Image: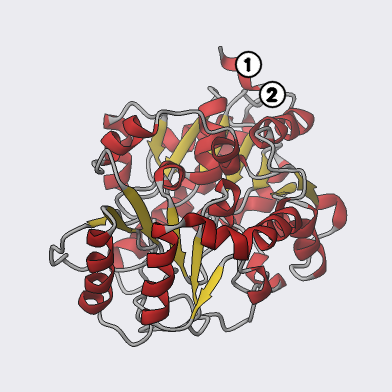
């Protein structure tokens, strides 16, 4: 759940959560042992957290968003609303907590929770273009361990983000396991997502405003209608469909239906990996989704727009492994060429794909990242994924 500082109800929830956290702490001081229970906490149950959830039956997801909690419960997901006494009991009993972002009011009590034996792990929600520094990770500096995607990723954490070498463990990112070990039926995924069962799927996934308030996610000075209208026209020529996936933090507008355009906003469709699995081409700007898509070895077009990052880059522009696009006509021309003859794309960019993939992931995108994360939990807590079965 994204906290909106101008909403009184969100502040009241934070205050109540702080009180519940204090109650949790008291119970943890009184109980005699931890239980084989793992708490997952993030904005949504997706990405790295979802991969761990699927492999660990003693993991339960906590969310501060009441509506999202009700939705998950209706789907049979193991979850609890964070601002409830039920969640307080779970945190009081748990042995480990894994987050992929912040902790809201829980973060005030992290040092005290750790003294009661609760282990904290972070597995961040993406490999970033966006620049960070140590101030952005004050909370995670208090954690027992940080799990990262590769040695290059670890170098960012130790040299730029202020972490000690022993605090950062290279595990690979669990979210990549399904991408590199993909054996699901694409037709079934398309049907589940409400997508056409045939034809090329082109994913447009821009990053959100980030540090540039008021930023337009549609590039090159185009309005939403102009940009999507141009993509709609070329998709019709090639029997393709455009999937528009805005970031969770992007305010979604009411759609004006256009032929061949389907909206899959992150706020409503959190399962990014399934969308990537069926997408044949990606159009993005500075979104970290590019590094997930990289593992699928499919054509990728980077819109060369002004980066919305006040602290520069973590991974710089040189990590854009596909075609860098400067204008809308250039995008349409290169899409047309790639859709008509995919080999033209790979003749230009295959070496770049391979080089960046090796740099970003090394040998750590091998389908075993989730297992390595569960092994890290076992080393710290003695809990094995099968312990609740």
- Quarter containing the C terminus: top right
Residue located 72% across and 33% down the image: 372
Occupied quadrant, residue 72: top left
Quarter placement of the N terminus? bottom left
What label does residue 383 carry, if any? 2
Q: The residue tagged with tag 1: helix, strand or loop?
A: helix
Q: Is residue 319 above or below residue 260?
A: below
Tell me if mark 2 has few (under 14), some (14-19) or many (20+) residues whose alpha carbon lies within 10 angstroms of its own. many
Q: Which label was assigned to residue 345?
A: none
Residue located farthest toward the left when viewing the structure as drawn = 257
Between 354 and 49, the one lying in front of the other is 354
Q: Which residue is mark 1?
A: 387
What percent of the width, then of the height, locates residue 360?
71, 57
Residue 67 horizontal side relative to residue 149, left or right: left
Q: Secondary structure at mark 2?
A: loop
**Residue 260 left/right relative to 374:** left
Q: x, y (%) of residue 109?
A: 61, 53
Q: Residue 384: where, in percent of width, then height? A: 68, 21
Above or below residue 143? Residue 233 is: below
Residue lying furthest top:
389
Residue under the point 73% across and 59% down: 355
Is 340 on the left-hand or right-hand side of 345?
Answer: left
The residue depicted at 51 percent of the width and 45 percent of the height is 47
The crowding category of the residue bearing disc 1, from other C-alpha atoms within 10 Å (few below 14, some 14 to 19, many at least 20), is few
Task: Farthest residue to the bottom: give it.
Answer: 221
Q: CA distance from mark 1 to mark 2?
A: 7 Å
Asked if residue 86 lies left or right of residue 121, the reply is left
Relative to 352, is 363 above or below?
above
Q: Position of residue 159 (x, y in %)?
A: 82, 68
- Tag 1 and tag 2, C-beta contact below 8 Å: yes
Q: Is residue 214 above or below residue 369?
A: below
């Amino acid at each position: 759940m994204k906290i909106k500082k101008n909403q009184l109800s969100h502040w009241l929830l934070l205050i109540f959560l702080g009180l519940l956290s204090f109650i949790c702490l008291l119970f943890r001081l009184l109980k005699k042992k931890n239980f084989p229970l793992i708490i997952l906490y993030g904005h949504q149950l997706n990405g790295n957290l979802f991969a761990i959830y699927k492999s660990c039956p003693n993991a339960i997801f906590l969310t501060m968003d009441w509506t999202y909690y009700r939705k998950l419960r209706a789907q049979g997901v193991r979850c609890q609303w964070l601002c409830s006494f039920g969640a307080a009991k779970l945190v009081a009993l748990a042995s480990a907590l894994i987050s992929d972002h912040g902790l809201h009011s829980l973060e005030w009590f992290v040092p005290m929770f750790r003294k009661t034996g609760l282990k904290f792990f972070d597995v961040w929600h993406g490999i970033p273009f966006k620049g960070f520094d140590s101030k952005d990770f004050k909370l995670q500096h208090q954690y027992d361990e940080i799990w990262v995607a590769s040695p290059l990723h670890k170098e960012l954490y130790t040299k730029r983000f202020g972490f000690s070498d022993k605090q950062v463990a290279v595990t690979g990112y669990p979210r990549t396991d399904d991408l590199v070990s993909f054996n699901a039926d694409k037709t079934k995924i398309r049907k589940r997502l409400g997508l056409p069962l045939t034809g090329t799927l082109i994913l447009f996934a821009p990053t959100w405003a980030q540090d540039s308030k008021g930023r337009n996610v549609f590039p090159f000075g185009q309005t939403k209608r102009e940009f999507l209208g141009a993509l709609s026209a070329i998709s019709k020529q090639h029997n393709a469909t455009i999937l528009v996936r805005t970031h969770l933090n992007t305010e979604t507008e009411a759609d004006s239906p256009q032929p061949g355009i389907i909206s899959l906003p992150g706020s409503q469709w959190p399962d990014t990996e399934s969308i990537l699995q069926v997408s044949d081409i990606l159009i993005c700007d500075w979104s970290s989704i590019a590094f997930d898509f990289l593992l699928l070895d499919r054509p990728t077009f980077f819109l060369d727009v002004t980066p919305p990052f006040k602290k520069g880059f973590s991974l710089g522009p040189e990590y854009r492994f596909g075609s860098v696009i400067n204008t809308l006509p250039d995008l349409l021309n290169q899409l047309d060429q790639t859709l008509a003859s995919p080999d033209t794309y790979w003749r230009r960019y295959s070496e770049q794909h391979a080089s960046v993939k090796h740099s970003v992931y090394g040998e750590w995108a091998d389908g075993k990242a989730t297992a390595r994360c569960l092994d890290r939990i076992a080393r710290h807590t003695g809990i094995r994924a099968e312990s609740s079965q």
